[in-house]
Image: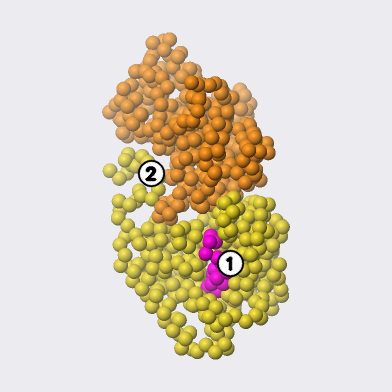
């Protein structure tokens, strides 16, 4: 297990155990890659927020600003053949996996050109063909069983892929967490669960409703290895997830990783989050992953210009994504009964 | 050529033939492997197909149902059994919010080719949490197909059709049919999903039913025949998609309908059918559609009480006479 002491205790009950990145040297290119992913995720989310505020989007969106390092680090550790599930706060996962921001944004807009032809929306981006993305899910806890089932399929087929179930702190209190982790452990399924613990399920601080300082420690109940890691350090997340994926791929069964992250926004875009103490955001900004990585890169000799260029490119890319989504057509109303098995509609409302 | 076997053996044959044919198929559920199922439907399967394809699960219905969804998204063909349909509340999310919806919500990116077998029905003196008929609940969710065979022949033919279907299919099997021995054809065959069957032709009234109550409807029809009332019995076999053409044809012929189901009457699938017939075939009807269902109560334990809670042949006879004003 990758556990060590953490001096930065920013949660109500304190974090006792955090994995630390090794002092290993990483190439500038690798670190720049993580930086670029984080910047692109944030830029996507900021663009989505602006579109939401302007009333360009249908429905609600849940932003992952503050969780970019977790996504960047975790997905850098994944292999192309690996599968994953995501959550309502899942835009960052799709971007980190190499998803096309245009298709993501179009899905948020409910457009025909989106990943799910506008039938899923922000909470349901999926891409089975290219990303091995089994879908973000609007039901908290649903991805746990689905990721375990995908891992079961991999075990039966022997395809050497691992399934990563990404979910938040809140869903660790669903029964599905315990039911499927127990089965995955018993059957030694190639599965890694990646908990992004931002401490809040909508308005409820996790420790008000949960009796352990960390969440990954529950894995011990099922004899499953686990690690808790600083989710504002993409390198620490990358290292931890690399170990977890090796463990799962080698036939040793599942591994649970908990990344401590911050949710800069409220639960949904527009939620003022008045239920949260001011210290939460003070600590969040002190630990901003993009700022920290910028500092680290500059210490390695990267110039400000280069970092600014990455930001400018991300902005340009996301501007184009918004333009694409905005200009894309909505689905034709006749498509309402397509993409599923339907029956008996000839005797229904639409006549 | 035909042979006489029990409904449970017919289901077993269907499962076995598909397991041999399709190496993507696996069976998962409580007591399915070592024990071979509480109704002995999968005895010997573990030895023949191995532990990767015949899986004993813990008592975690949400967990294993959800895992079946995940495996199906990856191209596997899981066949899950719930020991009783009453436990569908335990796996409601993976069945209703995931299996039924993910194809649509992903814009058609994936199919969920899974089969959920759920033994149902009253009459085994198992009280309120092991005796329900939840057709109305299951049929509510778009994306699921639902079959409810009565005969051994259809039980085998429909499970095979379900296992070859690209979409999730719920197979509702009445527990009190399992032991009935009936003729089935030799060899492999499929009963298509979505096709009803006229079990008995008649001209005075149509009894629409499915699963075990079809047998009761047939008994009632014999009794009525002795009194000169000629009843048609339409076995729906598939509830979703319903064979509307068969219903339309029969109702247009007899102009009188009763729907017989073991469900709690309030909110039943029988009610949905009644409403559809009322909306669509009003001009064909000589009398209002009548439903003969269970009471709006919890399924009771005591045999004396439980027998009050599902339609018997005598109840069906009474209802037919009432509708025909005889």
Vertical placement of residue A251 versus B184, above or below: below
Q: Chain of mark 1?
A: A
| Residue at 50 percent of width and 21 percent of height | B2
- Disc 1 crowd rating (10 Å Cα; few below 14, some 14-19, many 20+) is many
Q: Which chain is yellow?
A: A
| Residue at 65 percent of width and 60 percent of height | A250
- Residue A96 seen from this side: yes
Q: Using the image, tell me which numbered label, if any, was put on residue A196.
A: 1
Foreground of the two, A131 or B174: A131
| Residue at 32 percent of width and 57 percent of height | A331
| Magenta extent | A67-84
- Disc 2 crowd rating (10 Å Cα; few below 14, some 14-19, many 20+) is some
What tint does the image give chain B?
orange
Looking at the rendered structure, the secondary structure element under dot 2 is: loop
Cα distance in 3D space between marks 1 and 2: 37 Å
Mark 2, residue position = A342
From the viewer's perspective, tell me whether residue B38 is left or right of residue B114.
right
Q: Using the image, tell me which numbered label, if any, was put on residue B277.
A: none
């Amino acid at each position: 297990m990758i556990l060590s002491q953490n001096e930065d205790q920013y949660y109500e009950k304190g974090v006792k155990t955090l994995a630390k990145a090794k002092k290993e040297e990483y190439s500038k290119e690798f670190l720049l890659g993580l930086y670029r992913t984080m910047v692109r995720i944030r830029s996507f989310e900021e663009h989505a927020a602006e579109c939401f505020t302007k009333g360009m989007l249908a429905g609600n969106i849940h932003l992952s600003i503050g969780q970019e390092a977790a996504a960047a680090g975790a997905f850098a550790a994944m292999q192309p053949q690996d599968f994953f599930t995501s959550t309502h706060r899942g835009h960052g996962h799709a971007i980190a996996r190499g998803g096309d921001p245009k298709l993501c944004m179009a899905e948020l807009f409910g457009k025909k050109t989106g990943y799910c032809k506008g039938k899923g929306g922000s909470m349901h981006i999926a891409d089975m063909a290219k990303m091995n993305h089994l879908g973000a899910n609007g039901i908290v806890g649903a991805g746990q069983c689905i990721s375990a089932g995908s891992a079961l399929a991999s075990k039966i087929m022997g395809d050497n892929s691992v399934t990563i179930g990404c979910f938040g702190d809140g869903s660790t209190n669903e029964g599905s967490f315990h039911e499927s982790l127990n089965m995955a452990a018993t059957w030694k399924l190639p599965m890694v669960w990646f908990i992004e613990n931002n401490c809040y399920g909508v308005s409820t601080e996790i420790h008000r409703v949960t009796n352990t300082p960390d969440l990954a420690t529950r894995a011990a109940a099922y004899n499953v290895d686990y690690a808790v890691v600083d989710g504002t350090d993409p390198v620490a997340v990358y290292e931890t997830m690399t170990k977890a994926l090796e463990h799962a791929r080698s036939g040793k069964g599942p591994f649970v990783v908990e990344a401590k992250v911050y949710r800069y926004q409220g639960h949904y875009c527009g939620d003022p989050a008045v239920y949260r103490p001011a210290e939460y955001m003070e600590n969040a900004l002190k630990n901003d992953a993009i700022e920290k990585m910028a500092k680290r890169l500059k210490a390695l000799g990267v110039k400000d210009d280069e970092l600014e260029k990455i930001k400018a490119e991300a902005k340009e890319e996301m501007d184009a994504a918004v333009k694409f989504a905005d200009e894309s057509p909505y689905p034709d109303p006749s498509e309402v009964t397509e993409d599923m098995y339907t029956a008996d509609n000839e005797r229904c409302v639409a006549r | 050529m035909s042979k006489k076997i029990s409904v449970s053996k017919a289901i077993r044959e269907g499962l076995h033939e598909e397991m041999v044919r399709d190496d993507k198929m696996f069976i998962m559920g409580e007591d399915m492997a070592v024990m071979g199922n509480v109704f002995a439907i999968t005895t010997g399967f573990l030895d023949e197909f191995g532990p990767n394809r015949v899986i004993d699960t813990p008592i975690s219905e949400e967990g294993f149902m959800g895992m079946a969804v995940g495996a199906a998204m990856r191209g596997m063909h899981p066949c899950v059994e719930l020991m009783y349909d009453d436990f569908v509340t335990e796996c409601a999310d993976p069945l209703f919010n995931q299996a039924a919806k993910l194809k649509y919500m992903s814009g058609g990116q994936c199919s969920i080719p899974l089969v959920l077998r759920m033994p149902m029905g009253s009459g085994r003196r198992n009280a309120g949490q092991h005796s329900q008929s939840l057709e109305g609940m299951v049929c509510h969710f778009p994306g699921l197909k639902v079959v409810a065979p009565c005969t051994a022949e259809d039980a085998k033919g429909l499970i095979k059709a379900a296992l070859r279907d690209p979409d999730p299919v719920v197979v509702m099997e009445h527990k009190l049919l399992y032991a009935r021995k009936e003729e089935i054809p030799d060899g492999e065959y499929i009963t298509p999903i979505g096709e009803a069957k006229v079990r008995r032709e008649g001209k005075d009234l149509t009894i629409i039913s499915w699963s075990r109550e079809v047998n009761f409807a047939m008994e009632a029809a014999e009794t009525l025949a002795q009194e000169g009332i000629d009843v048609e019995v339409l076995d729906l076999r598939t509830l979703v998609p319903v064979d509307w053409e068969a219903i339309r044809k029969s109702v247009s012929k007899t102009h009188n309908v009763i729907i017989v189901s073991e469900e709690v009457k309030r909110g039943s699938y029988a009610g949905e059918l009644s409403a559809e017939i009322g909306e669509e075939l009003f001009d064909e009807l000589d009398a209002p559609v009548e439903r003969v269902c269970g009471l709006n109560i919890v399924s009771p334990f005591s045999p004396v009480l439980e027998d009050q809670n599902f339609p018997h042949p005598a109840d069906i006879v009474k209802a037919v006479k009432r509708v025909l004003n005889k």
